[in-house]
Image (cartoon, rainbow, N blue to C red):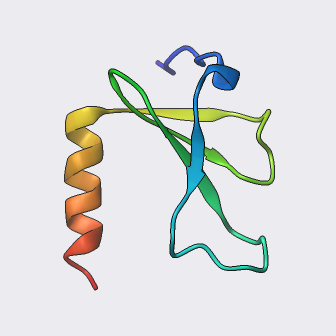
Amino acid sequence: MPAPQPHVRNYVWFKSSYSGGNTTECVECARTAAGTLVRDSKRPEGPVLAVEAGAWRAFVGAVGSLG
């Protein structure tokens, strides 16, 4: 079941320091009390993925171990 979409305008959105300057294929994240929100930077009013804090930490840790 999809999670309800949070009201995205109440958050501070940021891009990764690894985001390219060409504005393609970029995501933005916002921290919340429950975890992290993720959206397409080219569609800020589009869908938002809400990720629970523990799952986000596991994801970031796994991605960090790849590089």
Relative to 56, is 32 above or below? above
Residue 49 at x, y percent in the picture: 53, 35
When asked about the image quadrant of residue 24, the answer is bottom right
Question: Is 51 placed left or right of 61 in the picture?
Answer: right
Q: Give the residue at x 20% y 62%.
A: 61
Question: Is 47 placed left or right of 62 in the picture?
Answer: right
Q: How many marks?
A: 0
Relative to 14, is 61 above or below? below
Please, which residue is most extreme toward the front here?
12
Q: Give the residue at x 25% y 72%.
A: 64
Q: Give the residue at x 22% y 65%.
A: 62
Residue 58 at x, y percent in the picture: 20, 51
Residue 23 at x, y percent in the picture: 78, 71
Question: Is 46 placed left or right of 51 in the picture?
Answer: right
When asked about the image quadrant of residue 67, the answer is bottom left
Q: Give the residue at x 32% y 22%.
A: 34
Relative to 41, is 26 above or below? below
When asked about the image quadrant of residue 5, the answer is top right
